Image: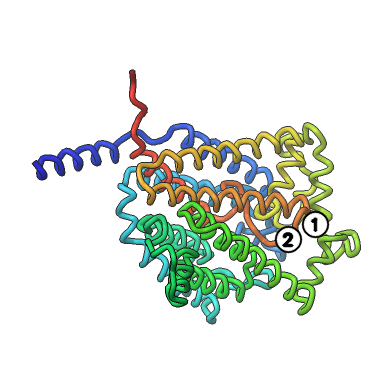
């Protein structure tokens, strides 16, 4: 009887693993990716003319290929979609075994960034070569995000709910201490805090503040979904606030960036230049925008218009209405992701979706907040829109994992 029961359970499990993927989530991802490629084509066409990698030669006056960024991003988009669909067909349970290796690889790569192998751009060292000494660059922080979500989800999905039973009187002091340690999740939290602290410390050395915030947000979201007590999150928020105050208010680190954030027009031709040009782009878009391809700020006025500040070009060309529609699409994708997490087959799948959906939501919010000068500039890209091939592929792989979990959601029973 036990063997027959196991066979029935295995057969049911295999049928769930081969179920249909969640079409609303897939359509939202593909729609955002398609719009992102089109907007990248518009935002990057002029700056590509003066990029040496695109063929620009100042001595001969030869201009570069205006489609250079778009072509490269389109290739990575195709590779990413193929990877997403392949991953979506895999059984996500196999990711449990990969959680520790991926996390260890991410930590090693973050350490390598701080060696002479690290590639520096714009006063930051966040990149490695694909083959260490040659090839395209990528950010190991993207691998770190993936590693943290996989590891936290795999480990926390096995945790027991509730506290062990003790006698009600608890007469001995050590018994009271033991009860508090178990009740407060203190011992259980220690390895996760250690991992987040190590990865955060390595990323701050690059420096990469926005990436650090994303890793912390993903880890905190998974811990919250796993049932860790709320008091720890309040304590963590207070500790982060104290650290930020010490770093900015006492030590004075990046105080100039804070000053520019509070008043970008105090130095509009130097430190505040990028923020000012971004706000000009957003303001000039008005309600309906200037029209696709008609941005003025992309003519080398706004730095990083194809990357971190592409949302400013979106606001300028599509206006408030177009930008709002894109925000709504991202919101629908995030809401659908959390809906899938609530209906996942097991805790592991649910925690995976919570981690990856939170990463996406926080990254979108931070990017748009920087463009609108709601927070200081952090150097963070907009998912599916900003130029960056390896980051796009990893983001689509993460979406593929969510789709893989959606395959095992049991269909609703029909009356």
- Look at mark 1 in the image and give the residue it sits on: 275
**Residue 254 at x, y percent in the picture:** 76, 72
Label 1 SS: helix
Q: Quadrant of the C terminus?
A: top left
**Residue 171 at x, y percent in the picture:** 44, 72
- Nearest the viewer among 117 and 255 is 255
Residue contact at pointers 2 and 1, CB within 8 angstroms: yes
- Nearest the viewer among 344 and 117 is 344
| Few, some or many residues within 10 Å of mark 1 (<14, 14–19, 20+) | many
- Look at mark 2 in the image and give the residue it sits on: 377
> Of marks 2 and 1, which one's residue comes earlier in the chain?
1
Position of 269 with respect to 150 (left or right) is right
Position of 373 with respect to 228 (left or right) is right
**Residue 373 at x, y percent in the picture:** 78, 54
Label 2 SS: loop
- Nearest the viewer among 162 and 391 is 162
Task: Identify the residue at horizontal 49%, vertical 49% (top origin).
Answer: 354
Outermost residue, bottom direction?
116
Position of 360 with respect to 243 (left or right) is left
């Amino acid at each position: 009887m036990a063997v027959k029961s196991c066979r029935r359970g295995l057969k049911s499990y295999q049928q769930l693993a081969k179920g249909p993927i969640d079409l609303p989530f897939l359509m939202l991802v593909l729609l955002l990716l398609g719009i992102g490629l089109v907007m990248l084509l518009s935002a990057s066409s002029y700056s590509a003319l003066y990029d040496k990698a695109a063929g620009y030669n100042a001595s001969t006056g030869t201009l570069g290929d205006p489609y250079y960024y778009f072509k490269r991003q389109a290739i990575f988009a195709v590779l990413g979609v193929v990877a997403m669909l392949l991953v979506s067909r895999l059984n996500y349970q196999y990711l449990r075994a990969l959680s520790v290796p991926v996390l260890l690889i991410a930590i090693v790569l973050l350490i390598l960034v701080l060696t002479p192998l690290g590639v520096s751009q714009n006063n930051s060292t966040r990149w490695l070569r694909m083959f260490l000494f040659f090839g395209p660059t990528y950010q190991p922080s993207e691998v770190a995000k993936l590693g943290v979500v996989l590891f936290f989800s795999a480990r926390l999905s096995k945790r027991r709910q509730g506290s062990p039973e003790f006698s009600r009187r608890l007469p001995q002091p050590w018994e009271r201490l033991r009860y508090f340690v178990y009740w407060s999740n203190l011992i259980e939290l220690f390895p996760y805090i250690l991992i987040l602290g190590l990865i955060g410390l390595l990323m701050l050395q690059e420096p990469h503040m926005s990436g650090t915030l994303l890793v912390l947000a993903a880890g905190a979201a998974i811990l919250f979904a796993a049932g860790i007590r709320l008091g720890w999150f309040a304590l963590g928020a207070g500790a982060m606030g104290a650290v930020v105050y010490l770093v900015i208010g006492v030590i004075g680190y990046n105080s100039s960036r804070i000053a520019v954030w509070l008043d970008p027009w105090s130095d509009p031709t130097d430190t505040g230049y990028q923020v000012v040009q971004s706000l000009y782009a957003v303001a000039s878009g008005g309600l309906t925008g200037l029209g696709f391809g008609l941005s003025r700020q992309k003519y080398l006025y706004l730095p990083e218009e194809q990357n971190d500040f592409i949302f400013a070009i979106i606001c300028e060309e599509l206006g408030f209405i177009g930008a709002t529609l894109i925000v709504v699409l991202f919101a629908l994708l995030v809401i659908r992701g959390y809906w899938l997490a609530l209906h996942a087959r097991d805790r592991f799948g649910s925690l995976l979706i919570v981690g990856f959906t939170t990463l996406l939501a926080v990254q979108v919010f931070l990017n748009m907040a920087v463009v609108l000068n709601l927070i200081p500039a952090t150097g963070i890209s907009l998912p599916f829109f900003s130029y960056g091939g390896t980051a796009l592929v990893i983001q689509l792989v993460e979406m593929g994992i969510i789709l893989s979990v959606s395959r095992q959601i049991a269909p609703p029973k029909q009356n």
